Amino acid sequence: MSQRVYRFTFGPWNISTGADPFGPPVRPDVAFAAKLREYKKLGFDGVQLHDDDVVPADWTFEQTKKGVAEVKKMLDGEGLFAEFIAPRLWEDPRTIDGAYTSNSPADREYAISRSKRAVDIANMLGTRDIVLWLAREGTYIREAKDPLTASQRILDAVNALLSYDKNIRILGEMKPNEPMDQAYLPTPGHFLALCYLTIDPARSGVLIESAHSILAGLDPSDDMAYTLWHKKLWSVHLNDQNGLKYDQDKAFGSVDLRRAFNQVWVLERGNFDGCVGLDVKAMRTTKPADQTKHLANSRAIFLRLLEVARSVDAAKVESLRADRDYEALEMYVLERLMGR
Ligand code: 3MF
Ligand code: MG
């Protein structure tokens, strides 16, 4: 049996200046073109993009068309493809109170039209996938918005995009908190339920980020398995997270190798055929010369864990399960992870 070849992607935001809420940049900004030149060297195949990673959000349609064509040429020149476009609905002043769930009708309208523009950009770049990380769809205090109305508004927005273009797919990337105190549709399971209510469930699915599941107190590999079972896991953001605190985007496997292994193992067993996205951040202490190491390391860890997953003796696992000898099963997995 020929083995599946995984395609690796990341976004330009994963090479960053190291600024955080408490301090300024510590590394010089890297130009977009220079970032693109790093991809192949690091063993990556495609690029994940926000709409305004491609062209500024306030450009006219004509400017946008021209600008996107230039970026397409750059991607082609580097032998890269665009995996998805994600409308960045959390920086503009009109998204202060959320985008699709804002209490302001004018601001909701802005969010929809900006998202449609992301669809246009996706078409121009030759990808059909739109990722919605619903950053500010939630509240700081429960009373601020009506949660029943909010769910309906998110569904209406997804439907508006699905009917705007009959070819695109919507992938919800859910996260339970940060920047909001409580997000609406906080987990992949929540978005999955919404998928079935859309005008085209076949074009509605999810992207799962490891850290987001961990922040929700869930195991990412189980979240992945559940959505794979629904045939709705279309992309992943692998990374790691040290407990329930701010979103850390640590290198994949760097906190809990076994948890990372279980993600790789389930993706492999579940015939995941989306891209392996790595949404990882360099430490603030990282020197400019080393600012892509976290990406190379995360990819390397994935591939090492894939070797382990492929070397698992499935019959042995089955027999230990049948014998209910989970102590031995645990030791078997740990031994594999320690190289025996
Ligand atoms: C936040 C995220 C986002 C999304 C990105 C693409 C900035 O926790 O994970 O990263 O991945 O917007 O949808
Ligand atoms: Mg992400």
Image (spheres, grey):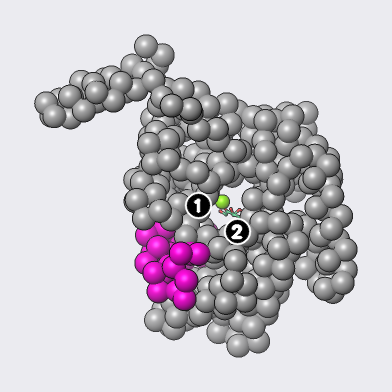
User: Going 67% across and 67% down the picture, which residue do you hit?
Assistant: 119
Q: Quadrant of ligand 1?
A: bottom right
- Residue 199 percent coordinates (x, y): 47, 76
**Comes first in the chain, label 2 or label 1:** 2
Q: Is residue 168 above or below residue 233?
A: below
Question: Would you say residue 188 sits in the magenta stretch?
Answer: yes
The amino acid on which the numbered mark 1 sits, given as a three-letter code, is Trp
* Residue at the left extreme of this rendering: 323
Q: CA distance from mark 2 to mark 1?
A: 9 Å
* Residue at the bottom extreme of this rendering: 105
Q: Could you classify mark 2 by the number of other residues whose Cα lies within 10 Å: few (under 14), some (14-19), or many (20 or more)?
A: many
- Residue 308 percent coordinates (x, y): 42, 22
* Residue at the front extreme of this rendering: 1
The amino acid on which the numbered mark 2 sits, given as a three-letter code, is Asp
Quarter holding residue 296: top right
> Dot 1 corresponds to which residue?
234
Q: Is residue 315 visible to the viewer in this orientation of the structure?
A: yes
Q: Is residue 117 above or below residue 217?
A: below
Quarter holding residue 340: top left
User: Going 66% across and 56% down the picture, which residue do you hit?
Assistant: 127
Q: Which residues are magenta?
A: 175-204
User: Going 40% across and 26% down the picture, which residue do you hit?
Assistant: 309
**For this view, does 97 lie left or right of residue 198?**
right
The secondary structure type at the circle numbered 2 is strand
- Residue 59 percent coordinates (x, y): 84, 71
Residue 129, numbered circle: 2
- Residue 143 percent coordinates (x, y): 43, 81
User: Going 43% across and 26% down the picture, which residue do you hit?
Assistant: 1
Question: Would you say residue 51 sits in the magenta stretch?
Answer: no
Q: Are marks 2 and 1 in contact (CB under 8 Å)?
A: yes
